[in-house]
């Protein structure tokens, strides 16, 4: 990654919603009735040149990010069921116009991306590794908050306490961690190796326990590839939009209701296993709330505006990748969902186009900085 750009935003967060009728129907299941606007994305930006396709017609603006506007999440809170799709269908308006409304990067964004380039330059100079914490198994709450440039950031959160510092995830497999550290000439922490070899069964160990002799032979001879032992888990695309639309209090309450319902009647092995998994989900949601609180942000209630919605969705994704290793962790399709919040804020004067662009630029930077020790940075 020789320069940090925003031209591929559609792959991670903010694909412009300039869609035709077929695409719009696929996104939200609605008919195109009137033009609106697209979710913000700059056409081209680098930390060295900070260029756009045409000269930006904007001025640097101070961040206000008012938090009060007619709240569009009230109807979701009033419903008894969790229904993100239905909410999007109700609130999303497709956009068929051009990109002339877009604002360029703010001064704060330029400073933030310049700082990011300093980190990336050091990472490249160190052979592709900025830093690594080999002593702390990564969990949702394992590391203190990290900031790139707190004064200029509007979206917060990194996988560790320092941007680009990589973490270890031995729950997937201690040998995977050991080999990854060896590749960057960092010794394995003996205590971590001892715990995850002698006391804690890892996913990798469990998978190998299941493999038959024939499966192992096929794996060793590269007849079967892409097996779950190498990934440490399967492909995961979580619905992180739920955090923003409902808040973690509501999600926890729903999971507790699900657990209580499962505990009724006769118990069998599949049901007991599912109850345990739901209990883990409740625990993870509580830890996610705690992680957000360490950044001074309350995600227990629904997001009130575009900035909060973007931050809450990202926190959901961040919590996932702090616990799971691999390149197949996807943020998912969030553009139509977030656009509902941006549209509402712009219509009510809560944010300007420049502030909206600033939120998206910050979000893109956060996702771009997501990295793991075992796999190269997600892009």
Image: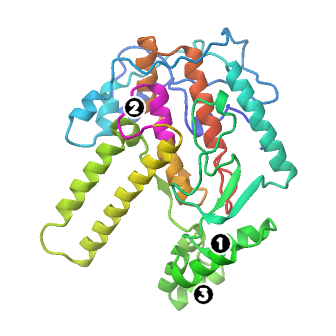
Q: Which of the numbered marks, if any, corresponds to residue 48?
A: none
Residue at 52%, 44% in the rendered image: 294
Q: Is residue 154 left or right of residue 333?
A: right
Q: Total label count? A: 3
> Quick one: SS at disc 2?
loop
State the image coordinates of residue 252 (x, y, percent, origin top left): 31, 50
At label 3, counting other C-alpha atoms closer than 10 Å, the crowd grade (few under 14, some 14-19, many 20 or more) is: few
Residue at 50%, 85% in the rendered image: 209
Q: Which colour style is shown?
A: rainbow
At label 1, counting other C-alpha atoms closer than 10 Å, the crowd grade (few under 14, some 14-19, many 20 or more) is: many
Residue at 41%, 56% in the rendered image: 284
Q: Which of the numbered marks, if any, corresponds to residue 176?
A: 1
**Residues rendered magenta in the picture:** 298-314
Callouts 3 and 1 close, C-beta under 8 Å: no
Q: Tell me the residue that label 2 is attached to.
A: 303
Q: Which of the numbered marks, if any, corresponds to residue 217?
A: 3
Q: Relative to 46, is 182 above or below?
A: below
């Amino acid at each position: 990654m020789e320069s940090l750009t925003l031209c591929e935003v559609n792959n991670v967060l903010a694909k412009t919603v300039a869609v035709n009728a077929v695409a719009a129907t696929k996104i939200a299941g609605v008919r195109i009735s009137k033009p609106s606007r697209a979710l913000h994305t700059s056409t081209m930006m680098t930390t060295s040149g900070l260029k756009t396709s045409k000269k930006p017609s904007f001025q640097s603006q101070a961040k206000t990010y008012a938090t009060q506007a007619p709240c569009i999440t009230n109807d979701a809170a009033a419903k008894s069921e969790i229904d993100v799709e239905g909410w999007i269908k109700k609130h999303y308006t497709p956009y068929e116009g051009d990109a002339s409304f877009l604002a360029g990067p703010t001064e704060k964004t330029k400073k933030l991306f310049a700082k990011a380039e300093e980190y990336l330059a050091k990472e490249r100079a160190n052979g592709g590794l900025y830093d690594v914490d080999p002593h702390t198994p990564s969990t949702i709450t394992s590391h203190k908050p990290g900031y790139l440039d707190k004064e200029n950031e509007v979206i917060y959160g990194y996988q560790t306490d320092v941007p680009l510092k990589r973490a270890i995830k031995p729950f997937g497999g201690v040998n995977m961690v050991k080999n990854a550290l060896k590749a960057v000439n960092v010794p394995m922490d003996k205590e971590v190796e001892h715990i995850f070899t002698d006391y804690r069964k890892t996913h990798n160990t469990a998978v190998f326990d299941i493999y038959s002799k024939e499966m192992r032979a096929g794996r060793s001879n590269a007849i079967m590839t892409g097996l779950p032992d190498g990934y440490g888990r399967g492909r995961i695309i979580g619905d992180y939009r739920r955090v923003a639309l409902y808040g973690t209090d509501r999600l926890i309450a729903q999971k507790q209701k699900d657990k209580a319902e499962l505990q009724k009647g006769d118990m069998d092995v599949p049901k007991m296993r599912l109850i345990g998994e739901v209990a883990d989900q409740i625990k993870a949601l509580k830890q996610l709330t705690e992680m957000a609180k360490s950044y001074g942000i309350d995600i227990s209630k629904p997001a009130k505006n575009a900035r909060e919605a973007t931050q809450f969705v990202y926190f959901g994704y961040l919590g996932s990748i702090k616990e799971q290793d691999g390149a197949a962790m996807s943020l998912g399709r969030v553009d139509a969902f977030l656009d509902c919040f941006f549209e509402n804020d712009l219509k009510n004067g809560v944010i300007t186009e420049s502030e909206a662009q600033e939120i998206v630029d910050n979000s893109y930077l956060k996702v771009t900085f997501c990295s793991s020790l075992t796999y190269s940075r997600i892009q």
